[in-house]
Amino acid sequence: YIDWNKEHGFSQLDPWMKHMELGFEDDAYIAKVKAAGDAAGLPFGCVAVDGGHIYEPTAEKRAANRKVAKRWIDICQQLDAEQVRIDAGGREETLDQIFDIVVEGYNELVAYARARGVEVIMENHWGPTKHPDNTVKVLDAVDGLGLLFDSNNWAEGTQEYAWEKCASYARLTHMKTFEFDAAGNDPTVDIAKCMNILRDAGYNGAWGIESCPLTISEIEGAEKTLALMKRISANW
């Protein structure tokens, strides 16, 4: 992963925590990961965490998740990573049902992370945050909470509204692609429009790629997405 990012000219590393789970209880392993990034000349940007989400229906499960989230924040500090992605949680629940718990949890984690030089960002990932108005409501309620803007993870029929509504909150991006035509474009999503909305909203962070191809490998999909994004940004 680190070598591929270096070979393809990326400016930072945004690993999924699943790729570093051996380090959850082993600081020496994380030190090796950090050394590999340093050797490649690439800083760590955001660590995307699963299993540390804020909302669970019981206090016991919420406390367990909070412990997981804080451990990954500590790992981010060890990696000198700038950001950590922590999901809001909730699947069938409405935002109104879980709002107070989500805000309280994010306030705690934002303070914990800030003391360690790490920014907490929430992704429009699953549950209530697939709805753009919900995403903005949480972001407005928690001082210091940023948005990991995923181009695709929005409720059906809300995608372009979500791009416009949430672009100004973006602190990091996942440009998600699924398939490519002969011209190298993804016919299922207007990546150019999404990127231009973000740029016009003042976004100046890293452009991340999430490769979800239906018929080719993830690596080939990522390479095609990179080429597409370079063509788009060349017109700026």
Image (cartoon, grey):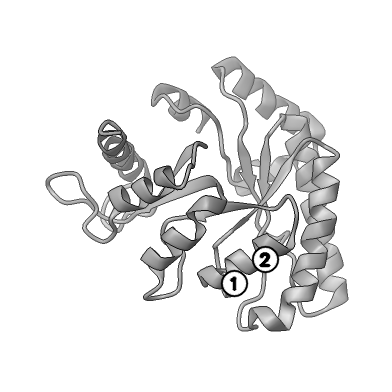
Residue 21's spot in the image, x, y percent?
69, 45
Q: Nearer the viewer, residue 110 or 164?
A: 164
Q: Nearer the viewer, residue 110 or 49?
A: 110
Secondary element at image label 1: helix
Q: Residues within 10 Å of mark 2 (few under 14, many from 20)?
A: many
Find numbered disc 2 in the image and state the secondary structure of the residue it sits on. helix
Pinpoint residue 191: horizontal percent, then vertical percent: 31, 51
Image height of 179 relative to 133, above or below:
above
Q: Quadrant of residue 65?
A: bottom right
Q: Is residue 89 left or right of residue 103?
A: left
Residue 126 lies left or right of residue 67; in this view the side is left
The one of 166 and 179 positioned closer to us in this rendering: 166
Q: Residues within 10 Å of mark 1 (few under 14, many from 20)?
A: some
Residue at image point 75% right, 54% down: 143
Q: Identify the image quadrant of the C terminus.
A: top left
Tell me where residue 56 sits by quadrant: bottom right
Name the residue at 56% across, 17% down: 41
Residue 36 visible? The answer is yes
Disc assigned to residue 218? none
Is residue 65 visible in the rendered image? The answer is: no
Where is residue 147? Give x, y as percent: 59, 53
Tag 1 residue? 134
The residue beneath circle 2 is 138
Residue at screen point 41% across, 24% down: 9
Q: Is residue 201 left or right of residue 17?
A: left
Residue contact between numbered discs 2 and 1, judged by CB atoms under 8 Å: yes
Above or below, 141 against 186 in this view is below
Kind of residue at badge 2:
Val
Label 2 – label 1 distance at C-alpha:
6 Å
In percent of width and height, residue 157 lies at: 37, 75
